Image (cartoon, rainbow, N blue to C red):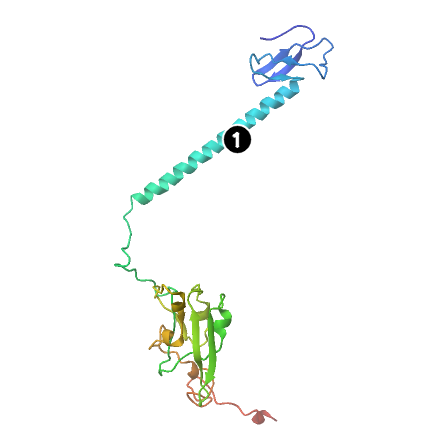
Amino acid sequence: MVNKSPGARPDKRASGWILSPVPSAGIIPPDATHSCVLGQGCGIRHNDTGSTIKKIGTVNTQLKRFSMFIIKDIKAIFIGLWTTWKHICRPALTIQYPEEKRTPSPRFRARMVLTKDPDGEERCVACYLCSGACPVDCISMQAAEKPDGRRYAEWFRINFSRCIFCGFCAEACPTMAIQMSTEYEICKRNIMDLVYEKEDLLIDGCGKDPNYNFYRHAGVGVVNPRGGNPDEEPPTDPRGLMP
């Protein structure tokens, strides 16, 4: 109902301009209250029309936000259900382990091994690079030297209970002695059984590179005299370079 009595002023609502009765002076005292014309039973009592508009705008904003949240939640539920039904319709790829075992990729990183060169000698020269590159410090060794000057590891130890199989040791090894195998079944009941010595790691073979021999390329006179390897030149006498 629109009140067109003198002294009324416009009251902007959601449904248009509604006139509400006010004192003839046109100013509502701060301590005065009046009922909303539209609010028959709405329960809103206010001091001026501006506060009513503000309250209605706040309620509308909250309703919009609530509706957006409901729509997003429903959309997320349907996406999850679609993903579930999409996989339900696919054939199962279950492997009955341990009766059936999956063959890992050749680049799979599992238990490390120590390899030998084509001559049957240990590739490891105990340079400590693998121990320094290990982020969990699970590798230790002791260097030794043969009478011909060839270095080797007197003992080599790795704690597989701390190993994270990152492969940093294999990347740091200059002689390709350390290589990552595909053997992933290394669980033990006793944690001390996961500490492997050199005898447990050493294999009879060259691993992934059967033709590499460190001492034939290192320039050290162990396999051949210095400069005697096919891709080397004999040492130069520095006194022969003098004018």
* Amino acid at circle 1: Arg
Q: Residue furthest front?
A: 190
Label total for image:
1
Residue beneath the point at 46% across and 35% down: 72
| Quadrant showing the C terminus | bottom right
Q: Residue at x 40, y 65 (%)?
A: 191
Quadrant position of residue 78: top left
* 101 over 90 or under it: above or below: below
Relative to 89, 55 lies left or right: right
Apparent side of residue 230 relative to residue 66 in the rendered image (left or right): left
User: Does 34 appear above or below 81?
Assistant: above
State whether residue 191 is above or below residue 151: above
x 38%, y 73%: residue: 201
What residue is shown with label 1?
Answer: 65
Element class at badge 1: helix
The relative height of residue 93 versus residue 4 in the rendered view (above or below) is: below
Q: Where in the figure is residue 118, as x and y percent of width and height? A: 35, 81
Q: Nearer the viewer, residue 188 or 243?
A: 188
